[in-house]
Image: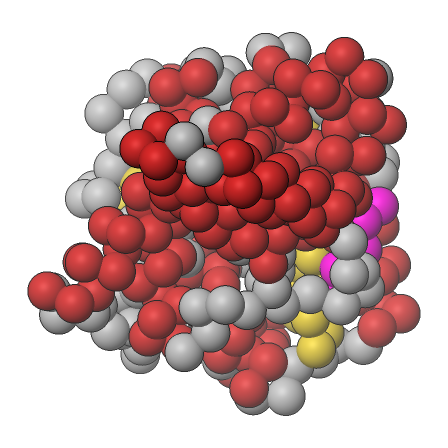
Amino acid sequence: MENLVSVIIPNRNGGTTIGKCLAAAQASQHGNFEIIVVDDGSEDNSIEVIELYPCKLVRLEQHGGAAQARNAGAARSRGRILFFTDADCLLQPDTLALAASTLALEGSNAIIGGTYTPAPHDRRFFSRFQSIFINFFETRHAPAADYIATHALAMDASVFRGNRGFAEGVRPILEDVEFSHRLRRAGCRLVMNPAIQVQHIFNYSLVRSLRNAFTKSLYWTGYAIGNRDLLADSGTASAGLKLNVLVFAGNAGLLSGFVLTGKMILLAFMALALAFDLFVNRGLLLAYRRAEGLGFALVAALYYLLLYPLAVGAGAIAGMLRHLFSSPLRPRENR
């Protein structure tokens, strides 16, 4: 169907969020869409919640991962446009209309991306920190993008099928990065439209925030080493974040040296490194101020500079070790 948008949502034990996700999708202002939920072997009450909403439910008996679930949803879709999002994301009323119009403007060979709203669904500090962080880094080079994340990805269905969909054997949480890079090599254009937004349900505590930073860094590092772009300025895996981790590690070494030797010059070097870090990451810190005010921005800056890089750096080291001592996962093409 010419203007039909197929909204594809993978779900794995998302009983606490999938209802909100489906209610938001159903309230879309775009007049012609279908909603397909692929339950990936959930063990909670997800099915009971999903069945309360007018959508097509596809059930996978065994847990196969988000890539397999998205491919299963696409295989059962009827729309010319596929829109991928997640079970903990809330479409805005204009999300689908903006995605469809952007794809029509850019052409069928474009992969259209959106991002998170700066304000998350919950108001916890670490949720607000993360939502602004992702919004800023995903959109700062718009309309250019190194990858399009599957929390808001729109594309022509024939292009998706012609490129065999998502690879089902890549490292967890990176199927959209591999997909983006593979389709770009095939001649597709990656286009980011910052106006296309979904609101994420984070519910992040300090522990969950640090665990997320560690996990993403672990898998991203292994993928980036294999892709030979470890130092690339790529979305949330930005050059600014990588510099922040290096400055943190360097300043930890300088501080240790000062404690052992008492040489004041080491503190001067620390101050210079921190000033350079602040300068490079000034855009992110200003984004925190614009979104949440000066007080929030100051606390966010302290967290970003003094604690967040510890989790990211630990994940990077673990990713390097994992890459060195284990066989890398190879993408499994879909037949």
- Quarter of the rendering occupied by the N terminus: bottom right
Residues in magenta?
A: 191-196
Front-lying residue, 272 or 194: 272
Q: Is 168 situated above or below 236?
A: below
Q: Give x and y (percent) for residue 30.
A: 82, 43
Q: Is 307 situated above or below 184?
A: above
Residue shown at 70% from the left, 77% from the top: 189
Instruction: Let me know if residue 250 appears in the view.
Output: yes
Q: Is 91 situated above or below 43?
A: below
Front-lying residue, 124 or 306: 306
Q: Is residue 9 left or right of residue 187?
A: left
Q: Give x and y (percent) for residue 105.
A: 89, 70
Residue shown at 50% from the left, 68% from the top: 231
Front-lying residue, 73 or 257: 257
Q: Give x and y (percent) for residue 220.
A: 39, 57
Residue shown at 48% from the left, 19% from the top: 204
Residue shown at 63% from the left, 88% from the top: 187
